[in-house]
Image (cartoon, rainbow, N blue to C red):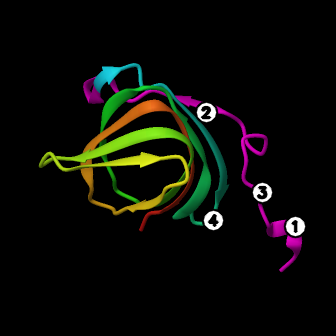
Amino acid sequence: MSVSTIKMIGTDRADTEQYMPDAEKIVAGNPAQLIWHCYDNKDETFGAGIWQGEPGSHKVSYTEEEVCFLLEGKVVVSDENGGEVTLSKGDMFAIPAGFSGTWTTVETAKKLYVVYEQ
């Protein structure tokens, strides 16, 4: 296999996708998002890219496994039982498939993400 199969990940490496959670999922604010999805394997079960979110809260329900590294900003992830974790620039974390809760972007945030979905 050639080095030409290696994909660089960055905001200058993919088209920018604008995304807004469905209205019924928005809890507060205007959680507008930008996504630079840079890589998918051939069967599209594994991918990677950069995500950026503006301040606001929205409901999340993960069908995929996700590992993230927060490049900038601050977020709070809350579960359905009221537990929460605050994540800031430099934090690396994993969210398992099946997690449901609320994602709150406190300060404009940017993360590197890797996802796997069976």
Residue type at tag 1: Ser
Q: Which residue is mark 4?
A: 41
Contact check, label 3 and label 4, Cβ < 8 Å: no
Left or right of 58? Residue 83 is left
Q: Nearer the viewer, residue 3 or 79?
A: 79
Query: Which of the two marks, 3 or 2, is nearer to us in this view?
Result: 3
Can you say whether 10 is above or below 46 in the image? above
Q: Which residue is mark 3?
A: 8
Q: At x 81% / y 68%, what residue is drawn?
A: 5
Query: Which of the two marks, 1 or 3, is nearer to us in this view?
Result: 3
Distance Cα–Cα, label 3 vs label 4: 14 Å
Range of the magenta residues? 1-26
Left or right of 44? Residue 30 is left
Quadrant into which the C terminus falls: bottom left
Q: At x 73% / y 42%, what residue is drawn?
A: 14
Q: Which residue is mark 2?
A: 17
